Image (cartoon, grey):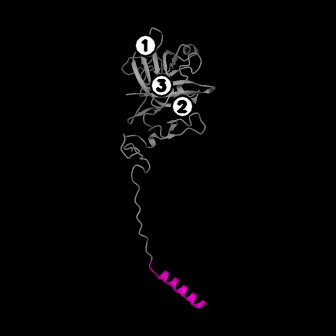
């Protein structure tokens, strides 16, 4: 009996080895639809429900290297350095701004503004720049009025950011523009003149208005972040009309709250 079983198993094994092999007929559908990954070009962006949205650069040109873990801006949205700064959309680099495929270099220090006939030593820190001149002061000695309805701010802006100026209201960073390009303003967050005490509570999209003798502009908040006291990045000039607001961080003297906003057009 044992020999019979062994013989039967041997015959089965031999038969299986002699039979021809056939590949499995499998069909795998390729992934499709907006739910599969993100596009990597500037051509199309889809909304969550599958509809087409406006063109947006989601390629490596707009990619950000995130801040280091534990840094002051580690958890702030839209912070970090561009992965490809020379290709970044509207990014200000030391060589200039990359806008619409063309690199625009800011004027040199002391250079005259185009078509203005201006001369002098005030540095142009970006593409857009309007310097403070005597005719831009109001009779009360201030340059502008800043309003932030969300946190109840309505304050006059004076030239300079020293303690004497900030005792009167908000202060304009002298190295920045007063109108076109980047306007930067500082204010106290405590004491009798704590106009910026709730600055850090602003949300993306909150509105800010700035009125000068050149007109009134409305800005929309684009970021709220905690930065090092030595971080002057938000004072850099911009091609677009933008606003930067600085104040101290309570009980953290090494840091500042920084709010940036862009003109609503």
Vertical arrangement, residue 83 with respect to residue 194, above or below: below
Tell me residue 101's x, y (percent).
Answer: 38, 37
Residue at 42%, 11% (x, y): give it.
135
Kindly identify which numbered label has been placed on residue 193. Answer: none
Viewer-nearest of labels 1 and 3? 3
Disc nearer the start of the sequence (3/2): 3
Residue 124 visible, this orientation: no
Q: Mark 3 points at which residue?
A: 150
User: For residue 10: magenta?
Assistant: yes
Vertical arrangement, residue 20 with respect to residue 181, above or below: below
Tell me residue 228's x, y (percent).
Answer: 59, 29
Residue 60 visible, this orientation: yes
Depth order, front residue of 124/235: 235
Q: What is the spatial separation of the Cα atoms under label 1 and label 2, in whole angstroms?
A: 31 Å
Q: In this view, does 167 lie to the left or right of 122?
A: right
Instruction: Assess whether mark 2 and mark 1 are in contact (beta carbons under 8 angstroms).
Output: no
Image quarter (top left, top right, bottom left or bottom right) of the C terminus? top left
Q: In this picture, which residue range is highlighted in magenta?
A: 1-20
Disc nearer the start of the sequence (1/2): 1
Label 2 sits on a secondary structure element that is strand
Depth order, front residue of 102/191: 191
Q: Bin the neighbour count of mark 1 within 10 Å (Cα to Cα): few under 14, some 14-19, many 20 and up.
A: some
Q: Is residue 66 left or right of residue 263?
A: right
Q: In this view, does 52 lie to the left or right of 12?
A: left
User: For residue 52: magenta?
Assistant: no
Label 3 sits on a secondary structure element that is helix
Q: Mark 1 points at which residue?
A: 136
Q: Mark 2 points at which residue?
A: 225
Disc nearer the start of the sequence (1/3): 1
Give the dominant element type of the magenta stretch: helix, strand or loop: helix
Label 1 sits on a secondary structure element that is helix
């Amino acid at each position: 009996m044992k020999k019979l079983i062994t013989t039967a198993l041997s015959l089965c094994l031999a038969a299986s080895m002699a039979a021809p092999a056939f590949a499995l007929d499998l069909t795998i559908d390729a992934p499709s639809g907006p739910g599969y990954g993100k596009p990597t070009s500037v051509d199309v962006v889809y909304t969550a429900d599958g509809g087409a949205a406006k063109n947006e650069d989601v390629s490596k040109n707009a990619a950000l290297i995130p801040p280091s873990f534990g840094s002051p801006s580690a958890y702030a949205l839209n912070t970090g350095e561009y992965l490809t700064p020379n290709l970044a959309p509207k990014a200000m680099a030391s060589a200039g701004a990359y806008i619409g495929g063309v690199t625009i270099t800011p004027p040199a220090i002391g250079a005259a503004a185009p078509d203005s006939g201006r001369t002098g030593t005030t540095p142009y820190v970006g593409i857009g720049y309007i310097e403070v001149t005597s005719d831009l002061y109001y009779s009360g000695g201030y340059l502008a009025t800043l309003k932030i309805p969300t946190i109840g701010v309505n304050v006059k802006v004076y030239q300079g950011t020293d303690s004497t100026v900030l005792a009167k209201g908000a202060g304009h960073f002298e190295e920045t523009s007063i109108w076109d390009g980047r306007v930067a303003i500082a204010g106290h967050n405590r004491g009798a003149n704590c106009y910026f005490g709730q600055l850090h509570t602003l949300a993306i999209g909150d509105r800010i208005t700035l009125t000068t003798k050149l007109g009134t502009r409305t800005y929309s908040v684009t970021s709220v972040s905690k930065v090092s006291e030595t971080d002057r990045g938000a004072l850099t000039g911009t091609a677009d009309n933008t606003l930067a607001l600085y104040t101290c961080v309570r009980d953290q003297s090494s840091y500042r709250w920084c709010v940036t906003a862009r003109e609503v057009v």
